[in-house]
Image: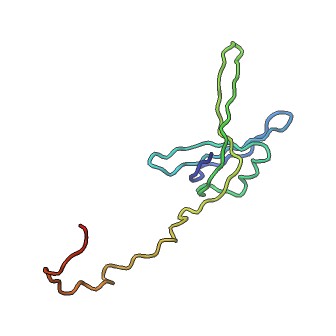
Amino acid sequence: MEVQGRIKVIGETQTFGANGFRKREIVVTTEEQYPQHIMVEFVQDKTDLLNNYQVGQQVKVNINLRGREWVNPQGETKYFNSIQGWRIEAVQADAGAGNVPPVPPADAFEPAGELNKEDHDDLPF
């Protein structure tokens, strides 16, 4: 799966526990009718992937959905979801826009000459 949008926030790398578990979060804002602010976490060696990106940059992030179960001290079972990134790449904001040829201005066309109403029009409409 993937999320595409503009980087809103890039967090600092956080380290947890004696084993040095590393995590870094990024927020990507989608560009659609109702923009969504999607937080994606990168873990361990994937945290370094964010070093070359800045806030405001257009990106595509490949993600995996993760879920886990936790039983609290009172015996209640809770479920948590996370979005984990594993690849990120820059996207050009106007990609493909340069492939469309420019449209000439309307005054570049000559007006139609004299039209004869009796000429047969073979257009189907």
Tell me the residue at 15%/83% (across/down): 116
Residue 117 coordinates in the image, percent (x, y): 13, 80
Most foreground residue, 18 or 49: 49
Residue 83 falls in image quadrant: top right
Residue 77 coordinates in the image, percent (x, y): 66, 18
- Name, please, the residue furthest toward the top: 74
Residue 23 falls in image quadrant: top right
Instruction: Please state if 85 lies on the left or on the right of 33 as rendered.
Output: right
- Name, please, the residue furthest toward the left: 118
- What is the basis of the colouring in this image? rainbow
Residue 49 coordinates in the image, percent (x, y): 73, 52
Tell me the residue at 17%/83% (across/down): 115
Most foreground residue, 45 or 14: 45
The quadrant of the image that shows the C terminus is bottom left
- Name, please, the residue furthest toward the right: 18
Residue 89 coordinates in the image, percent (x, y): 66, 56
Instruction: Please state if 97 lies on the left or on the right of 3 as rendered.
Output: left
In the figure, 99 relative to 91: above or below? below
Most foreground residue, 105 or 119: 119
Instruction: Please state if 51 lies on the left or on the right of 81 as rendered.
Output: right
Q: How many marks?
A: 0
